[in-house]
Image (spheres, rainbow, N blue to C red):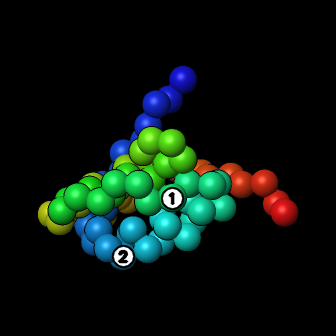
Amino acid sequence: MIDHISVGVSDLERAAKFYKATLATLGLTRLVTRPRTVGFGKAYPEFWINLREGMPRVGPESGVHICLRAKTV
């Protein structure tokens, strides 16, 4: 069982806006806000984004993949 997921981002506020809208379809809301991290979840933070300013972009051949699925209403 996965307890939580943590993702590095280069622009925290831009990513927070994106994930707020995206994760809302799964019923997750912004629960924790800190200077360099934001946590989304239902009862506790299950999905974290963390500021990593100097992080290089992940290349398309890296194999990294995150897929979010929501029920269609």
In the image, 58 versus 32, the foreground residue is 32
Secondary element at image label 2: helix
Image: 5 above or below 67? above
At horizontal 23% and vertical 58% (from top left) the residue drawn is 34
Seen as rendered, the residue at the extreme top is 1
Seen as rendered, the residue at the extreme front is 43
**What's the amino acid at mark 2?**
Arg
Question: To which residue does mark 2 refer?
Answer: 14
Q: Which mark's residue is nearer the viewer, 1 or 2? A: 1
Image: 68 above or below 22? above
Task: Name which of mark 1 and mark 2 comes first in the sequence.
Answer: 2
At horizontal 49% and vertical 48% (from top left) the residue drawn is 41
User: For the residue carrying disc 2, how many other residues have a C-alpha within 10 Å: few (<14), some (14-19), or many (20+)?
Assistant: few
At horizontal 18% and vertical 62% (from top left) the residue drawn is 35
In the image, 60 versus 16, the foreground residue is 16
At horizontal 46% and vertical 31% (from top left) the residue drawn is 3
Q: Quadrant of the C terminus?
A: bottom right
Name the spot of residue 57 as percent of width and height, x first: 30, 63
Q: Quadrant of residue 38?
A: bottom left
Residue 63 visible somewhere in the drawing: no
Tags 1 and 2 touching, CB below 8 Å: no
Name the spot of residue 17 as percent of width and height, x first: 43, 74
Separation (CA) of disc 1 from disc 2: 16 Å
Task: Answer with left or right where residue 46 lies relative to residue 56.
Answer: right
Question: To which residue does mark 1 refer?
Answer: 29
Seen as rendered, the residue at the extreme left is 54
Seen as rendered, the residue at the extreme right is 73
**What's the amino acid at mark 1?**
Thr
